Image (cartoon, grey):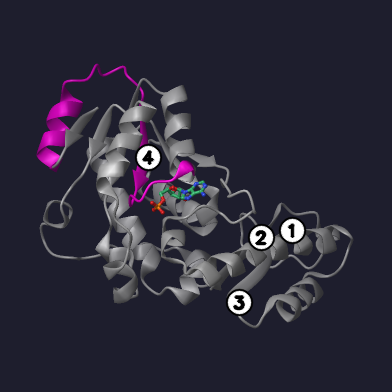
Amino acid sequence: MLIARSSKELLNILSSLNRDHSVGFVPTMGALHPGHLSLVNSSIENNDITVCDIFVNPTQFNNPDDYKNYPVTIDEDIQKLRDAGVDILFLPTIDDIYPEGLKKISIPLGVYNEVMEGQYRPGHFDGVVTVVKKLFDLVKPTRAYFGEKDYQQLCVIRKMVEFFKIPVEIIACPTVREKDGLAMSSRNLRLSPEGRKLATQIYKAMVEAKEMFLQGLPSNEVAAAILKKYSGPLEWEYFEIRDENTFLPVENKHQKRNTSIICGCLC
Ligand code: AMP
C-alpha cells in the first residue's frame, strides 16, 4: 500500500496509473472498524485501484469538544487497510486540504439541511460537502463508497455530485452492526460501559417501530409510542419515518413510498 501524506504526493502516484483503470474511493475519518472495511472491500471487489483517505475534517464538526475528542487510531488503521488490500492511502494535513483557512462552501441542500442532522448539527453538511468536493477533485474516482449508517450524508453527497455534475458513481453500502444491533461507529469507542449498554436500545426501538409501521399504525403514533417507551436515559434528538428520497414525512404504510426510519440519539 502506498501512503501519500500530501496532495502533491497523491497526485504524483495517481498520475502514474493507467488512465483506463477504474478508481474506487473510500473517504473516512479513521478509527476504522468493520463498517469502514465493508466499504473498502466493496471498492476492492469492483475497481482496479482502491484509494482510501483518513482525515478528521475540522469543518464538519459543529461541536469543538466532539472534534477534540474524536478517536484516532492511525497505526492500527494503516495495518487494517494494508491487510484489506487497499492500494493507496491518503493522509493529508489540515493545511494541505485547507491552504486558505477553514473556509466552507455552501450549496443549496434544501430539506437535507433543514431536518434531523441538518437541524441538530448546523453547518455540518457544508463541511462535509466542502471536504468531499476537495477530495473528489484530487482523486477523481470512478466510484465512491458511503455508508447508509449516515443516510442523510449519503443523500447530501448525491445532491452535491448532481450540483457540480461530477462524473462519479456513488455506491451506498449497508450498515454493519454489532451482534446486539448497535451500528458500528468510531464514536462508540467513547461510550462509557453504561452508555454502550443503553445504546443497544436504539436498534431495538427501530426494529419495534418498523413492526408497528408495517402493521399499519400511523407514523406519528409509532414515533410517540417509541419515544414514550425508550426515553429517559436515552436522549433522542429525532425519530422520524420519512420518504427516503424527498425526506417528506410518511403518514402510514398505505402511502406506498420507499420509507426509512431515521433517528439520532445521545447516550
Ligand atoms: P466516518 O469515518 O465515520 O466518516 O465514516 C466513513 C464512511 O464509512 C462513511 O461513508 C460512513 O457512512 C461509513 N460507515 C461508518 N460506519 C459504518 C457502518 N457501521 N456500516 C457501514 N458504513 C459505515
Categorize mark 4 by other alpha carbons within 10 Å: few (<14), some (14-19), many (20+).
many
**Which three-letter amino acid code belongs to the residue tagged 2?**
Tyr
Find residue 208 and report its horizontal and vertical position in percent: 78, 62
Find residue 131 and report its horizontal and vertical position in percent: 28, 54
Q: Quadrant of residue 86?
A: top left
Looking at the image, residue 33 lies above or below residue 180 = above
Categorize mark 1 by other alpha carbons within 10 Å: few (<14), some (14-19), many (20+).
some
Q: Is residue 55 left or right of residue 9?
A: right
| Disc 2 residue lies near ligand 1 with CB under 8 A | no
Magenta region includes residue 17: yes
**Which three-letter amino acid code belongs to the residue tagged 3?**
Leu
Q: Is there CB contact under 8 Å for labels 3 and 1? A: no
Q: Is there CB contact under 8 Å for labels 2 and 1? A: yes
| Disc 3 residue lies near ligand 1 with CB under 8 A | no
Of 70 and 163, nearer the camera is: 70
**Which three-letter amino acid code belongs to the residue tagged 1?**
Val
Of 54 and 122, nearer the camera is: 54
Q: Earlier in the sequence, mark 1 or mark 4?
A: 4
| Cα–Cα gap, marks 4 and 2 | 26 Å
Q: Earlier in the sequence, mark 4 or mark 2?
A: 4
Q: Earlier in the sequence, mark 3 or mark 4?
A: 4
Magenta region includes residue 119: no
Secondary structure at badge 4 equals strand
In this rendering, which labeled residue sits more in front, label 3 or label 1? 3
Judging by the rendered image, the residue that carries numbered circle 1 is 207
Q: Which residues are magenta?
A: 6-34
Judging by the rendered image, the residue that carries numbered circle 2 is 203
